[in-house]
Amino acid sequence: MSEIRLVVQGDDLGMCRAVNEGIITAATDGVLTQTSVMAPTPWFAEGAMLAKKLGIPTGLHVTLTCEWEYLRWGPLTASPSLRDADGLFKRTVEEAMLGGADEAVVEVNAQIDRAQACGLELSYVDPHMGVSLVPAYEAACARLGKKFMYPNINPHHEFSTSVMWLSLASRRDRGAWFADQLERLGPGTHMVMAHPAVPSDELRAVTPPDAENYFWAEPTRIADLEALCAPEVRKIIENRNIELIAARDL
């Protein structure tokens, strides 16, 4: 076993087809080692099928919000307190805080049920948009983790020596930034959080270009994919004998 271990996670599988394609590409042509699935999203069924077919390790990306203007999804359960005026998930964590904890538990159970029904073996639970920071949803995730015996991984505290937020690095130099971070890694288990996607009209259309969160639509996702597939990144991993692993290996 190498002294340096690296988990490379791609979030949001199922959000849209461009994200599904980006995550699959990052796993087959790049260094991605696991993906977090969003069970209520429009392209979840395809994403789950591809992850299972290719053997990509998965975890549940607990989804209790929908941040986009034009790409929308809602709860799998009735859960009226989790819905906005259109009957879909609320857009922000702050709005989602108004939801009921009991309904959140029921909804998260339904999301795991859907993932399992698609044949996914979930090895961890993590939050979309950081909803675990909300006490009610944190309790829901904890109860779910105990019930289903999945580790509710908090990458900041529970198992990793460090966390790298690839999606927040400069888009222009993201591959170089990632390579530099890999050169600096010391012994331990490290984690990279990414949101890869392929360029597409679909991705550009999820929210207006002048929206505050447009950065999270297409720009940062394309840059993430390029960095995860960069030859210099693979070369450093090989030269430094960095072991690529998933949460299920811990």
Image: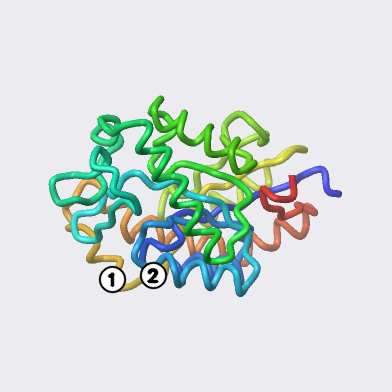
Instruction: Give SS at disc 1.
Output: helix
Residue drawn 66% across the image and 42% down it: 190
Q: How is the image coloured?
A: rainbow
Residue 170: give x, y in percent of width and height.
42, 49
Q: Are marks 1 and 2 in contact (CB under 8 Å)?
A: yes
Residue drawn 45% across the image and 34% down it: 140
Residue 206 sits in quarter: bottom left
In the displayed structure, 243 sits above or below 96; it is below
In this rendered view, identify the residue nearer to me: 28 or 129. Answer: 129
Identity of the amino acid at label 1? Glu
Residue 74: give x, y in percent of width and height.
28, 53
- Residue at the disc numbered 1: 202
For the residues labelled 1 and 2, the Cα–Cα distance comes to: 7 Å
Residue drawn 39% across the image and 36% down it: 131
Q: Is residue 107 left or right of residue 24?
A: left
User: Which sits earlier in the primary sequence, circle 1 or circle 2?
Assistant: 2
Q: As drawn, which residue projects farthest toward the left?
A: 85
Q: As drawn, which residue projects farthest toward the top?
A: 135
Identity of the amino acid at label 2? Ala
Q: Badge 1 local density, few (<14 within 10 Å), some, or many (20+)?
A: some
In this rendered view, identify the residue nearer to me: 221 or 124. Answer: 124
- Residue at the disc numbered 2: 18
